[in-house]
Image (cartoon, rainbow, N blue to C red):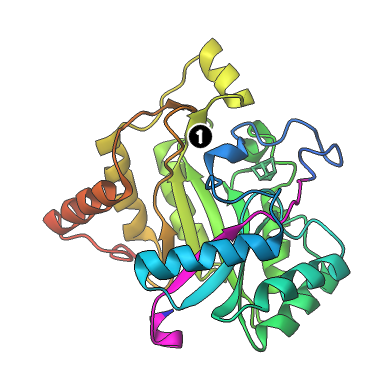
Amino acid sequence: MKEIYGQPVYKVNVDAGFTCPNRDGSLATGGCIYCNNDSFRPSACTSTASLHDQIEKGIPYLRSRYGAERFLVYFQPYTNTYASASVLERLYREALDNPGVVGLAIGTRPDCIDAEKIDLLETLSRDHFILVEYGLQSIYDKTLAFINRGHDYACFKNALTLTAGRGIHIGAHLILGFPTETRDEMLDMADELSGLPIEFLKIHQLQVVKETALADLYAKKPFAVFGYHEYIEMLADFLERLSPDIVLQRLFAAAPDDILIAPVWNKTRSELLLDLDAFMEQRGSYQGKKR
Ligand code: SF4
């Protein structure tokens, strides 16, 4: 972003009031088994405030705290392309109509995109930075079935085919640590994703949070979750096999303490990054080393 805009660009999180087909009954009602949107929605971002108010509130905070001048409006919770193209156009243009906003980051499911929505995003991307972040979580259909994603890996690849080459930036979300996968299978995902047209990747460790089906499963039959140092080593191994062209936007999750069940590490983001950096430096490791 510094190369494009000459300065850092900060995300303003908004909740535009979308729901999700995996929760509203279109596909299912239970959602993904790990899903508790409170675990990844900042408390300042709430759908009860209008989009305009959320952006107007978020920007001054980032300006005063970080000296920020350029912003991406981040449509984060639930499925942010889950509406007609005309509704999406109104919301996206409203978000872009703010001084300092250079683009959008849009979190969504790969089964909630179509040619008409891609046409809209392509049009917007002519004058703005438009990033679509597709939730994938795993490339294994056995895992996608276990977590009740409601789509398979082929669906994700179809979404990439629709999106690639249209001037739209593409991101993906991945979770490491599902009990359905071996460590080697998790590492193989780095090779697989490196061959896809993905520019940005968000990874995090599987977290068991309250009020989810995963929490019920975990209570009945606890499964192994990553220990802190085990996860650092896993990340280092994963990054060595990941293309150096993929920009990492996240390496771990931090659900609020009051809803997190496992794993409990009591580490901040910066502690994890410093520890990962030190670990990788110590073993002469870097992203893409094993490609
Ligand atoms: S697709 Fe996203 S919002 Fe929908 S149930 Fe799964 S994790 Fe939750």
Q: Residue furthest top?
A: 220
| Residue 194, visible in the rendered structure | no
- Figure label count: 1
Residue in the image at 83% along x and 59% along y: 83
User: Is-magenta flag for residue 279?
Assistant: no
User: Which quadrant: the N terminus?
Assistant: bottom left
State which image quarter holds ligand 1: top right
Q: Is residue 272 above or below residue 289?
A: above
Dividing the picture into quarters, in which one does residue 166 lie?
bottom right
Residue in the image at 76% along x and 46% along y: 19
In the drawing, does residue 185 fall left or right of residue 77?
left
Q: Is residue 150 above or below residue 11?
A: above
| Residue 263, visible in the rendered structure | yes
Q: Which residues are magenta?
A: 2-20
Expressed as whole percent of the image width and height from the top left, the position of residue 132 reads 63, 66
Expressed as whole percent of the image width and height from the top left, the position of residue 113 reads 77, 63
Residue that mark 1 sits on? 178
The foreground one among 4 and 155 is 4
In the drawing, does residue 154 fall left or right of residue 223?
right
The foreground one among 186 and 118 is 118
Q: Residue furthest left?
A: 282
Residue in the image at 31% along x and 64% along y: 287
Residue in the image at 66% along x and 54% along y: 15
The foreground one among 6 and 68 is 68
Expressed as whole percent of the image width and height from the top left, the position of residue 215 reads 56, 22
Dot 1 falls on a residue whose secondary structure is loop
Q: Please tell me how crowded label 1 is: few (under 14), some (14-19), or many (20+) other residues with Cα within 10 Å.
A: many
Expressed as whole percent of the image width and height from the top left, the position of residue 260 reads 46, 28
Q: Amino acid at mark 1?
A: Phe
Q: Is mark 1 within 8 Å of ligand 1?
A: no
Q: Is residue 227 above or below residue 194?
A: above
User: Which quadrant: the C terminus?
Assistant: bottom left
